[in-house]
Amino acid sequence: MISHLLTSHTQKIETSLVRELLHYSQQPDVLSLAGGLPDEKYMPAYPSLDVLADSRQYGPSEGEIRLREQVVSIVADRGLSTVADDVLITTGSQQGLDIISRLILDGDSTILTEQPTYLAACQVFSLQGATIHDVASDAQGMSLEALRQAIDAHHPKALYLIPNFQNPAGHCYSLQRRREIAALLDEKGILLIEDDPYRDLCYEQVDLTPICSLLKTAPWLYLGSFSKVLWPGVRTGYSVSCPAFSPYLVKVKQAIDLHTNRLGQEMVSYFLSSGGFPAHLVTLKEVYKHKRDVMAQALSSELGDLVTFALPAGGMFFWLRLPDGVSSTLVLEEALRENVLVLPGVPFFPSESPLKDSFLRLSFARVSLDDINKAVAVLAGVIKRLLTK
Ligand SMILES: Cc1ncc(COP(=O)(O)O)c(C=O)c1O
């Protein structure tokens, strides 16, 4: 009835399967491996209002200066040198994706992503009417040859990458791949959008050098978030950009929501300055690493050679390749009958791929150890039953 009011892009927008499934995960009898949600048992308590600066008034569009300076020092530790003027505090890193998309993408633009990639980024890019081309990726990250070919074929405006513990595939780029990609982007002058929300959840010795820090001339935007390590409900993230982008990013941010919620910024900033953050990260890494290992063990002992997966070196996800002929969508339906929620890989493929329906993304972060074992046992039963059908 209102479809004539919608733009050509909003008419096409699809709802996110993840958000649709979230309501099942809130039912008490459902064991969910579906969402990318952190475990609230390990979220710090909110600081008392008494210790926070007054945040009742409107604030700066760029974000609170203290938090921006804290971000400067956080990203400096990662090898990315910047100044507070080039930091924008955003309403989660999702808003960073929205802001950069509004700035650079329209119906004539093309953006390249990994295959598979974060589905909510694709939603944002599509909302601007952009064309998305996904590029073959392996355990080391995006294939350099495939990237070169895609750049030459599609003349993209930007490349969107999640180099560390990717959502959904869990891969982490080798240093060599990071260097090669940076050199190619410099050669071609393509903007890099580097999305890095999982890097602090690191369980092995791997290289985490921001690819943005390796660029010499190509423009770049680096997105970070406090969602996976503090309080996702507080919606605090940030972008760091090459200086030329900063004034434009602030103008778009102003047009969207004036500024990010000040109380949330104060809470994050206070927690960072309290000195407890490093110890908090140590705890998170211990807890999640243990859950990861329990899930790996359960998958191996329940399903053996029927499925394939790589042990993720960090983050929250296993990317499970199902046996040939078993559809991930059917696994979702059948497992839900037994109160286990899993996420089919389908929506993570922006373009058609014969493998689209062959993967599940399984998150180990929020479930208890017992529930990991129970859920994987149910899942294994479903997969084995479907195999014999
Ligand atoms: C790769 C990636 N980027 C961005 C986001 C959005 O995170 P935020 O809560 O900071 O908006 C997520 C959340 O799952 C994600 O996985």
Image (cartoon, rainbow, N blue to C red):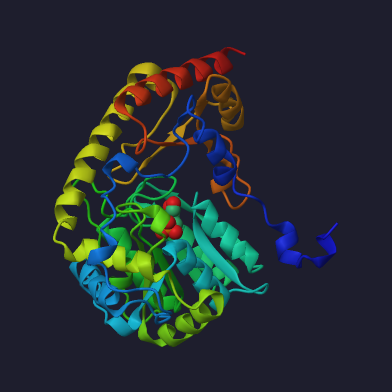
Q: Give the quadrant of residue 102.
A: bottom right
Taking depth in this image into account, of 301 and 177 the one nearest to the observer is 301
* Residue under the image location 22 percent in, 56 percent down: 207
Q: How many marks?
A: 0
Q: Which sits in the foreground, 260 or 206?
A: 260
User: Farthest residue toward the front?
Assistant: 50
Q: Can you give x and y, in whole percent of width and height, for residue 26 in the image?
A: 50, 35
Q: Is residue 267 above or below residue 138?
A: below
Q: Nearer the viewer, residue 340 or 383?
A: 340
Instruction: Say whether residue 92 is left or right of residue 127.
Output: left
> Residue 29 location in percent, x, y?
48, 24
Residue at 34% in and 68% down: 265
In the image, residue 372 above or below residue 153 = above
Location of residue 287 by image quarter: top left
* Quadrant location, the C terminus: top right
Residue 203 shows up from this direction: no
Q: Position of residue 49 (x, y in %)?
A: 29, 63
